[in-house]
Amino acid sequence: MLTYTIHPRFGDSDQLGHIHHLSIPSWFEEARNPIFKWFNPDFSLSSWNLILARLEMDYVGQIRYADQEVEIRTWISHIGRASFHISQGAYVRGECVALGGVVIVYYDYENRRAVPIPEKIREIMAEHYDENAPYKMKSGQ
Amino acid sequence: MLTYTIHPRFGDSDQLGHIHHLSIPSWFEEARNPIFKWFNPDFSLSSWNLILARLEMDYVGQIRYADQEVEIRTWISHIGRASFHISQGAYVRGECVALGGVVIVYYDYENRRAVPIPEKIREIMAEHYDENAPYKMKSGQ
Amino acid sequence: MLTYTIHPRFGDSDQLGHIHHLSIPSWFEEARNPIFKWFNPDFSLSSWNLILARLEMDYVGQIRYADQEVEIRTWISHIGRASFHISQGAYVRGECVALGGVVIVYYDYENRRAVPIPEKIREIMAEHYDENAPYKMKSGQ
Amino acid sequence: MLTYTIHPRFGDSDQLGHIHHLSIPSWFEEARNPIFKWFNPDFSLSSWNLILARLEMDYVGQIRYADQEVEIRTWISHIGRASFHISQGAYVRGECVALGGVVIVYYDYENRRAVPIPEKIREIMAEHYDENAPYKMKSGQ
């Protein structure tokens, strides 16, 4: 499990007085930066090799802008041949307020096709794999 | 089916040269405005009665900023007692590039609980219901 | 003057119950698409030739999500050798609620330098130039 | 001077391969959280007392998503009777890439008017005031 702290922005809120539902997957994306680094150690764009294929979000509770410390927990919840699942949760004072996940494909942009994930990266992913991650993708290759 | 046209913004793109995955659910939200109006004819915030419980997105193809006309198609794909599903698709030159949906709960903010959808609104929803909508939520009450 | 209509998204609002200040320059960007087309008729990224150097926004009044028709008016307010100013305003029921502008540089990305705007484009800009545009940039080349 | 570190999100980039111009004022807003706390110690929405009246941004250089540590520096650059200026800069490896500022009004939302800033808050602001802040608002009360 990886953990990361988000400090909500005023603009993350909406007129219902809570955090807007699309702010949370944006936080999750920020918390995935360390995973992107496994695949792209120098974040070089010219050799970028990941593409997002699916997104799921469950809104369990409401988050307020006033909740200035939101902990994002991140797990690898599935490791496929050419794709994998990242599951994530948002927690305020230890309580889960949102869960979700993404399917990411290891992708060759030049030839426009999925390619097998290298063994070296599979090993790093295995260290963060948790079969009991609190969110499992409901669909995705 | 409802249809709505989106003209992508330069900022909807990301460094991979295509539209960022979180821009599309934001477009879908804009295309849901007419549905919000069924529930809140004057968009009055003080009596707002909807809450989003779940979001799913499938990224079928890549969209470019240069694709300046993106058609959003919107269906009611499930009508429950106190919640319903909206399915949506993004189409470029007639080709589907993204699909997804949301679970929305008819919600009493004062008493913090789901309440049955009024018959009058159920009738409007029924007119836009399509059991063959191209996306079905994989989870959700 | 160019005019364009924006239909605010629920997520454009913030917890103060009005439109968040950063949603408006994003609307202005969408309304600049026709101008980008003068410079890049096919919106081709590989030959993109504009860079934004400065942004100014004056928040004159509050906008609500319920104000479902926001008119964006756009003027060319300065034409320089290698840069120009676009002034824009947001209007609800004819009343101005926000004004602002950007300085845009005609830019050669390969050689990383500003270059003179071609005469043909200057002529199109001149047709939309208004020395009495309601907003003038306070700074910018 | 206050300092704050931003870790750019993938979605902060645009198709030109750099950070989109509207991501930076959103970072600046996040870095203003400590200032909002001076005015609203518990971030309570019901007694919120600030409104943003003007925004200026100068894009000095390009920022990349790969620049994973962006330092935001924040100064109070003007203290008026009922409003003040916050100046901010974004720095990558010590080099300034963007500058800007906002005019914020101390605002009574109930009576819809600006009110004098309390002496106690003026004292805190004075500690962070810098007459040599690298950005000065070009306009604003």
Image (spheres, coloured by chain):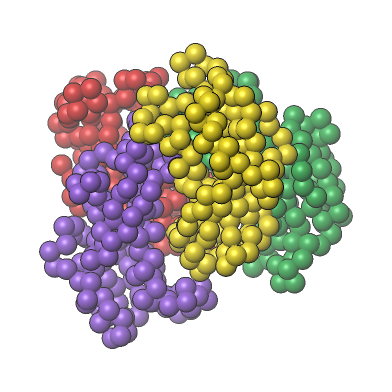
Chain colours: A purple, B red, C green, D yellow
Q: Residue furthest bottom?
A: A119
Q: Nearer the viewer, residue D82 or B100?
A: D82
Residue D68, position in %: x, y? 48, 66
Residue D84, position in %: x, y? 60, 33
Residue C141, position in %: x, y? 80, 50
* Res. A47 visible in picture: yes
Q: Quadrant of the C terminus of chain B?
A: top left
Q: Is residue B14 above or below residue B111?
A: below
Residue located 45% across and 79% down the image: A111
Task: Please identify the quarter of the rendering in which residue C2 is found.
Answer: top right
* Res. C11 visible in picture: no
Q: Is residue A93 above or below residue D96?
A: above
Residue located 75% across and 55% down the image: C105
Numbered label tally: 0
Q: Quadrant of the N terminus of chain B?
A: top left
Q: Residue furthest top?
A: D111
Q: Residue furthest left?
A: A132
Q: Nearer the viewer, residue C17 or C108?
A: C17
Q: Nearer the viewer, residue A45 or B105?
A: A45
Q: Is residue D36 left or right of residue A18?
A: right
Residue D43, position in %: x, y? 38, 34
Q: Nearer the viewer, residue D35 or C2?
A: D35
Residue located 80% across and 45% down the image: C125
Residue located 69% across and 47% down the image: D132
